Structure formats: structure tokens, C-alpha cells
Image: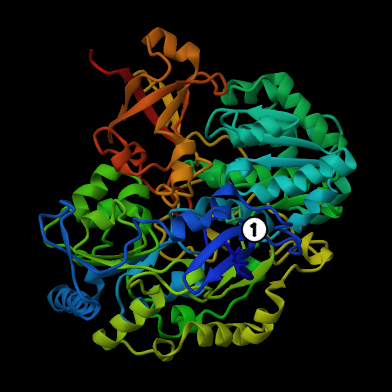
Amino acid sequence: MNETVRPRIAASACPHDCPSTCALEVEVFDRHTIGRVRGAADNAYTARVICAKVARYAERAHHPDRLLRPLRRLGPKGSGEFAPIGWDDALDLVAEHFMRAERAHGAEAVWPYYYAGTMGLVMRDGINRLRHAKKYSGFFSSICVNPAWTGFIAGTGKLAGSDPREMAKSDLVVIWGTNAVNTQVNVMTHATRARKERGAKIVAVDVYMNATMRQADLPVLIRPGTDGALACAIMHCLFRDRRADWGYLERYTDAPHELAAHVRTRGPEWAARITGCPVETIEAFAKLVGENKRAYFRLGYGFSRSRNGAVNMHAASCIAAVTGAWRLEGGGAFHNNGAIFHFDNSLIDGTDVLDRSVRMLDQSRIGAILTGETDALRGGPPVTALLIQNTNPVSVAPDQETVKRGFAREDLFVCVHEQFMTDTAKVADIVLPATMFVEHDDVYQAGGSQYILLGPKLIEPPGECRSNHDVICALARRLGAVHPAFDMTPREIIDGTLRKSGWGTLAELEANRWIDCQPDFATAHYLGGFAYPDGKFRFKPDWPKVPFPRARGAGPCPPMPALPDHWEVIEEADGEHPFRLATSPARGFLNSSFTETPTSLARERRPEVMIHPDDAAPLAVTDGEEVMLGNRRGAVRIRARLFEGVRRGVLIAESLWPNSAYADGRGINTLTGADSVAPFGGAAFHDNKVWLRKLPA
Ligand code: SF4
């Protein structure tokens, strides 16, 4: 008789680049096997709900295509021809190439490059310790958060806001510029609870009728990059209709009279011309905001990935200050909680050995850097050696053709430490197999909630996979890099970091599974004043001086609008490029992760671009037909999907498919630009002018 094996249930945390950082319960069958993954019911933010892709994590952890052994390139660069190599030989080769690069051009010729393939602090950020100890080129981490964080901090002075769980206590939840159903499902948990229990309304603002917009009571469909105009029109209506809280404005804000005068000429008709959204919808949105003071503005990342993204984020964040929504539980604004965790990063990042004179290279400009553009190199030596962990720049970085040209350089040595043979691993010289989150110990800090969570090692790694920490320490020994944390285990580093940061000990975290770091109500709602010295929310931020903690490495700040506005710096459509393209996240993928799991692939089917039927008709483009999308940066072959849920002139390509999923190997980032977003860098992934053509018969 078959016996059913009952798994044990182990606590963990989702490691993926998603604001929710869900508390997980993982079925563990034996030392090598996990089963179903569920959301922890007793975590107040996760509240039992997680996304489908992580619920089926066993598909990914036990995938037959996992990298299991170190590999060394045999054939020409990018040929995909590799042969197995032992760990010691592989690490010796990497160290030899790094030392050769250093001897030839100085330490800045080596560039450790990483991002958020895991959000675990030890495994994600430990590469910085090696960088700092060796004075390798700095990493200006610009690709994701900079415009969004800067825009939010511009108003409040600090990256924190109302408790995200308060959404459930709101009368109006505004989900702005984030397709939460696809990318952070927990926002929907709390927003729909408010609707069910309090009759709250949900407004969603986005550039296509995605799953979140379809669940909203009022979907506000706008053109990409026009959120600032929409926000100004909402504030115009609030002042016009005497819904502004002047008592709050006088006490808590810097320039309310200037703002009121400024938006007087920026009403719904003005905004309708810019956004493409009907006047009636803008008026209906403003009425809901005016009549429901207990309004919660949940501001996402998507709408900040535009050349005017920081200005748009700031403009949207201003609305809660006009109505005084911050005063009430269930009211105010929230984007990310980065400022509440106050971690001491010295053990993980080696900040205690950081030399601030070392140049910072902009992650988003990796193409320009690897192809030797002088300004991108900040006047320093060429990059001739790369160590890459937790990211896949040949797929995810903007200006892909330039990135590919850079990686094709014969004098560039590339080591990629990865879980799968990604587009970047394919062009490496050495590929090292990496562990997944259930195979190593780490600690996680949420962005979209207020938890610190532990993700302990639950099973043994498959094959010869090693953790990021192991690889960094092994390289440090070979390279003569000195720091106490190179001789510590991940658990020792976690314990030491928690203690140094005032968050207790590893044993306590292990017993409690997470730490709720939520500040008290008055602090979270800035009732004692906002985080500027005068306590005032800034309608008129001094952009170059916005206290964004990661600004080091940014170039000069151009002149920016003094007050909230539609800043006309986007790649506006023109005669040659009649469409605006946004590359929004697909539900089954998370950046380029999960593009290997069968269920996600079956769900997403193939790369497609959504086009309004009235735009397709004059081009004689039919549903499902293969078309070319292009601009001055390159061209992509992709299937058209006729879809009425976009404004005319707008195209949406849900991403991020591997380059190999496209007929000619050119991924969607062939079309995105790497020019820096003001004021502190960033990539404008949703701000592209393009043409669309039928393929020749
Ligand atoms: S919703 Fe986000 S944090 Fe939660 S399990 Fe899915 S990817 Fe992870």
C-alpha cells in the first residue's frame, strides 16, 4: 500500500523583487524536496495570499534546466558552447582574470554587477563587500527605484508613509501606476477588504485596462507619462470645489497658495488633452477624492519609469496633502517603507571599508559603459572584468543592442553566477551554479509592508550549486580581500546585523519568524510634521537637494518643474514614430525570473504587443499577426494583439520574455533607452516612441 508522505511546514520569506515580500509556509518533504508554498495566515500583510508563481515554486526549484555545475566557455562568445569545470579551477580562473584586469588598468577595471534576483540582504548585497574591500568600480544602482523614491521623498522628506494595512480601513483606495494583481497581489487583499467591509471605492490609474483596472470601481486610463497632468487636474478640482483642507495646508505644507494658483490653469480639459482621459472621468475621480477624506494613495513604481517619472510621482503624492488625508487612519499616501528599517550594513555590504573616491558606474548604462563611452566611464579606465550575480542585463537592461555589443568585446572577461542559463549567462566566460532561497539562509526587508523576515535554509542545494555568499568569500580569499564577514557564515552575519541594527538576534527572529517594524500612527502619518527641518510637505521641492539616500553616482540635475506639472521631457510620438510603447510586467513573470517555469510559459504563451483595433486597421494589421516595432535604437519582431483597453497611439508589451523568445533574438529592451532620468538616474522603460509596421509579404 502506498503511504502518503506528510511534509513538514517551514517558515520562509519570498525572495523575489516584489514589494510584498510575503511571509511563506513551505512544504518540505525531505532534505532535497519542497512541495506547495502558501502565504502565512498570521502575517498581517501577507494574510494567507501569495501569487500563483511562487505558490508553485517547486516547479522552479526542481526544474530540470537548473544550472548544476560550473561551466567554462569553449566556443566563441555567445555560442553557448560550454564544458564543465571544477569549482576550484573556475574560481582560480575568475580571480586570475580580475587580478590581470587590475594590473593592466587599476582596480576600477573590475565591476561587480548585481541586482534584485534575490532580495535577501546577505545574498544580494554581499557582493558590495568584495567591491569595497578591493576598491572595484562602484555600482550606482539606478535601474528600478530612483525616480519613484526621489519623487515620493521630494514631498515627504522620507521614504515612508501610512501603514499599508490601513488600506483596509479606507473609504477610497487609489492604486496609481501599479498593476497590483500582476505584481503585488497583497495590495488587492487589503483594498478589496475595504470595499467588502466598508463599501470603499477603488480607483486605479494606469496606461492599459489590466487586471487591476478591471477590478477597480473607477479605472482611469491615461497615456504613458501623463500622470503629472492628471494629478494637477485633481488638485485643481479640489481647490475649485472647496475640498482642500486649508487648516492642514497652512500647518503642514510649504507653498499651498502658490500651488492653488498654479493648478488654476490646469483643469480637467487641459489634462484631458494631455492624458487622453475624458473630462468626465477626471471629474469623477476628483469627486471621489473630495468626498472621501479617508483616502489612501497606494503609489506604485510603474508610472515612475518615464523621463518625467520623479515629477509624476511627486505630483500624485501631493494630492493627499491637499485634502489632509494624512490626518486619518486609512488615509495618506504610501510608496515604500525603506526608511523605517535602519539596518547597519557594515557586515553585509562592508560599508566600513568603503572608499568614496572610487568611481560609481551607472547600472542602467551598462551598454555605454561596456562599449567605452567616456562619460559613462566617468573618465576612468575601461571595464575589462565583470562579476554578475542576481541579474540578467543582456535581457533586462535598456538599450539592448548596445549592451550586446559591449558583452561581445573579446577583451572583456565575464563571470555569471546564476540559477539558469539566462541571456547573460550565455555570453559569459565562466558560469557558476547558484542556490535558490530555500537552499540558503538569508534575511529580508519588505518594501511594500513593514516586516523584516527570515528565510532559513530548508533543503540542500542540487548538484554543485553554491550560494552567493560562498562565492564572494571564496573569491575574496583568492584576491586577498580583507573583511571580517568573509570569514563568517550567513547566520553569523544575520545575527550580527540584527544586533548592530537594534532588531534583536537571529534566535529571536527565528522564533518569531518576522519583526513588525511599523512606526506608530503619529509618526507614519507625519502628525508631528514631515521629515524636512521645518516639518512641511514640499509642493516646491528643491530637486537637486531631495534627500534621496542613494543619490551618490548620479550626474548633474537638469532644471525641473518648480511645482507639480506635466513635464514635457517624455519621448513624445512624432510623424516617424506614431506610437508610445510601455513594457509592463506580465503576471506569470517577475522581470526575467519565472520565464523558465512551465506554468508561467503556458500562461503567457508568447511575446505580444497590444494595439488598439482602430490603430491596427489603417495598417492592415490583424490579430495575432507578426509585426515589426522599431525606433532609432533597433527593431523587434513580435505578434500583435488587438485590444480596446489602450488609448489610441499607445502600445503595451507585457514582459519580460527572454531574447530567445523573439524570432530574431532581439528582446523588448532593444527599444528602451538608457538616457538618465532626472534628478538621480533611472531607466524610462515605459517611455518609448516607436513605429509599427507589417512584415513584408
Ligand atoms: S506576491 Fe510578490 S512577494 Fe508575494 S509571493 Fe508573489 S512575488 Fe513573492
The residue most toward the front is 1
Q: Secondary structure at mark 1?
A: strand
Badge count: 1
Would residue 573 be visible to someone looking at this image? no
Q: Residue at x 82, y 30 (%)?
A: 287
Instruction: Return the residue nearer the eye: 593 or 286.
Output: 593
Quarter of the rendering containing residue 134: bottom left
Color encoding of the figure: rainbow
Point out residue 586 in the picture as x, y percentages from the top left corner. Answer: 50, 40
- Disc 1: which residue: 38
Determine crowd level at label 1: few under 14, some 14-19, many 20+ residues with C-alpha closer than 10 A. many
Q: Residue at x 51, y 69 (%)?
A: 438
Which part of the image, by quadrant, shows the N terminus? bottom right
Quarter of the rendering containing residue 95: bottom left
Query: Looking at the picture, which amino acid does disc 1 mark?
Result: Arg
Q: Is residue 541 left or right of residue 31?
A: right
Q: In the rendered image of this protein, does residue 108 appear above or below residue 689?
A: below
Point out residue 545 in the picture as x, y percentages from the top left corner. Answer: 55, 60
Q: In the rendered image of this protein, does residue 101 appear above or below residue 114?
A: below
Would residue 472 be visible to someone looking at this image? yes
Q: Is residue 155 left or right of residue 225?
A: right
Point out residue 696 in the picture as x, y percentages from the top left corner. Answer: 23, 15
Q: Is residue 409 left or right of residue 329?
A: left
Instruction: Return the residue nearer the eye: 262 or 97.
Output: 97
Point out residue 188 in the picture as x, y percentages from the top left corner. Answer: 71, 45
